[in-house]
Image (cartoon, rainbow, N blue to C red):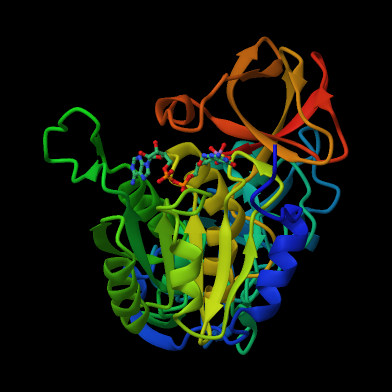
């Protein structure tokens, strides 16, 4: 059977595509930190102060000069004079001299002169003004030093870091309330096909509800983009042309689903070529699912034609749309999703020379994590919706064997 498309291996397809992508990261915008979760730093964030701002105790106990405790034990305690209690949320009004100690609570400010804290359970007190120290502590024990986390002037977050829970907390710890983040890439999403109807409508025989507009919007938003849906385009080149032109005028990248294969109604590639140079760079990738993928750049804007089959569209979006988003956002490295190792429960066959992605369910039995393949069809969305991750079968392999340990990319 003749092959309609010239297929490039996925890595090579990405290289060709990447070389034509705009190299500049999108411009910055200023946002309140509380609204910046999931956003990416546009420039390094420099600390305006030390963190902690003052040395503080990590335990409930007694602030001491460590040398006063040296040699102390249960059988031979050190006796220290109790001179007061450190207030919470205020500086102590006293300092610790030799032979003295003060009651301190977790998070309390270490008094001048003290350099360690003895935990309450390693002390006892038989007199109200005296504490018996039952264990020696080295200098710095149970203490957070001023500037131990961050020094004033230090870069706490470089450019290109995604702000998640810990980063947001770190910024508020420093009193940083606004941050410059990269503008969210606007990704236009067009579905095509005369048989595709909006999800709120009841399909007539031969019609299907639109999946791709919504699954791809969710993927784009999960990966830091702003999805802009342009609806369902009928199988008419002039409508696709007009809608694509409109989307390109408003967005940083456009994704079109369906119309990428070999039939007479598959004119997506031809229309992309009309939108600007260099146009289509790749049409056909040696991957399953998702062979009829189109990768193009028109006047500096990426345009991706995904296969209409919903499973293929999502798998290919992970391979090419997510890296485009990362590039526009200035995020470095591979993918965001993590991978886990799991043991394959059955043999998986694959064609040599082609890279395959297989949806799997993860099942834990005792200590071992198993990857149970889901025998999917690329049009059946719930064969992907039931999956926890994807197993990649490299082009060099003709399959993977039962019992083999594999990497599962989490969905
Ligand atoms: N003779 C050949 N036929 C096909 C080949 C081939 O190599 N030779 N490749 C097959 C593969 S693989 C795929 S994938 C599809 C890709 O086709 P298109 O990208 O042109 O997409 P369509 O044919 O329009 O749609 C495929 C399938 O998906 C349904 N669809 C489309 N859009 C949506 C949507 N938004 N929501 C839900 N479902 C959608 C559509 O109704 C079709 O059933 O071509 C194969 N054929
Ligand atoms: O490769 Mo198609 O994308 O099998 O469904």
Which quadrant of the structure image shows residue 122? top right
Judge left or right: residue 395 versus residue 30. Answer: right
Which quadrant of the structure image shows residue 82? bottom right
The residue sitting at 44% across, 87% down in the picture is 28
The residue sitting at 80% across, 62% down in the picture is 67
Residue 274 shows in this picture? yes
Is 219 in front, or is 32?
219
Q: Percent position (x, y) of residue 143?
A: 64, 60
Q: Percent position (x, y) of residue 263?
A: 48, 48
Number of residue marks: 0
Q: Percent position (x, y) of residue 353?
A: 83, 41
Judge left or right: residue 212 versus residue 63. Answer: left
Q: Is residue 58 above or below residue 245?
A: above
Q: Quadrant of the N terminus?
A: top right
Q: Percent position (x, y) of residue 29?
A: 38, 86
Is 104 in front, or is 406?
406
Is 237 in front, or is 243?
237
């Amino acid at each position: 059977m003749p092959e309609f498309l010239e297929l490039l291996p996925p890595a090579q397809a990405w290289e060709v595509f990447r070389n034509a992508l705009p190299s500049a990261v999108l411009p910055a915008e200023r946002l309140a930190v509380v609204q910046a979760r999931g956003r990416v730093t546009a420039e390094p964030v420099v600390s305006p102060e030390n963190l902690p701002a003052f040395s503080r105790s990590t335990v409930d106990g007694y602030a001491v000069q460590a040398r006063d405790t040296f040699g102390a034990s249960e059988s031979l305690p050190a006796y220290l004079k109790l001179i007061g209690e450190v207030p919470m949320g205020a500086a102590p009004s006293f300092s610790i001299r030799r032979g003295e100690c003060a009651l301190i609570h977790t998070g309390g400010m270490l008094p001048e002169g003290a350099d360690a804290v003895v935990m309450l359970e390693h002390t006892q007190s038989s007199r109200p003004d005296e504490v018996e120290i039952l264990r020696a502590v080295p200098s710095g024990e149970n203490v957070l030093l001023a500037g131990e986390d961050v020094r004033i002037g230090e870069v706490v977050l470089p450019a290109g870091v995604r702000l998640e829970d810990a980063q947001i907390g770190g910024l508020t710890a420093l009193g940083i309330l606004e941050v410059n983040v990269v503008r969210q890439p606007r990704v236009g999403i067009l579905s095509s096909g005369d048989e595709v109807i909006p999800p709120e409508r009841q399909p007539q025989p031969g019609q299907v509800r639109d999946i791709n507009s919504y699954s791809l919007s969710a993927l784009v938003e999960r990966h830091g983009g702003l999805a802009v849906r342009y609806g369902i385009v009928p199988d008419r080149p002039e409508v696709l042309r007009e809608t694509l032109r409109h989307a390109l005028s408003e967005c940083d990248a456009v994704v079109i689903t369906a119309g990428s294969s070999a039939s007479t109604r598959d004119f997506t590639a031809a229309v992309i070529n009309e939108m600007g140079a260099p146009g289509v760079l790749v049409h056909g990738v040696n991957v399953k699912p998702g062979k009829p993928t189109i990768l193009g750049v028109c006047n500096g804007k990426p345009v991706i034609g995904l296969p209409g089959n919903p499973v293929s569209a999502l798998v290919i979006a992970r391979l090419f749309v997510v890296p485009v988003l990362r590039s526009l956002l200035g995020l470095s490295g591979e993918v965001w999703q993590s991978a886990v190792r799991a043991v394959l429960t059955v043999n998986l066959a694959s064609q040599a020379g082609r890279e395959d992605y297989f949806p799997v369910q993860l099942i834990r039995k005792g200590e071992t994590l198993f990857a149970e393949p889901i025998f999917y069809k690329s049009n059946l969305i719930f064969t992907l919706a039931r999956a926890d991750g994807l197993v990649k079968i490299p082009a060099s392999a003709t399959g993977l064997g039962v019992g083999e340990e594999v990497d599962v990319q989490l969905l």
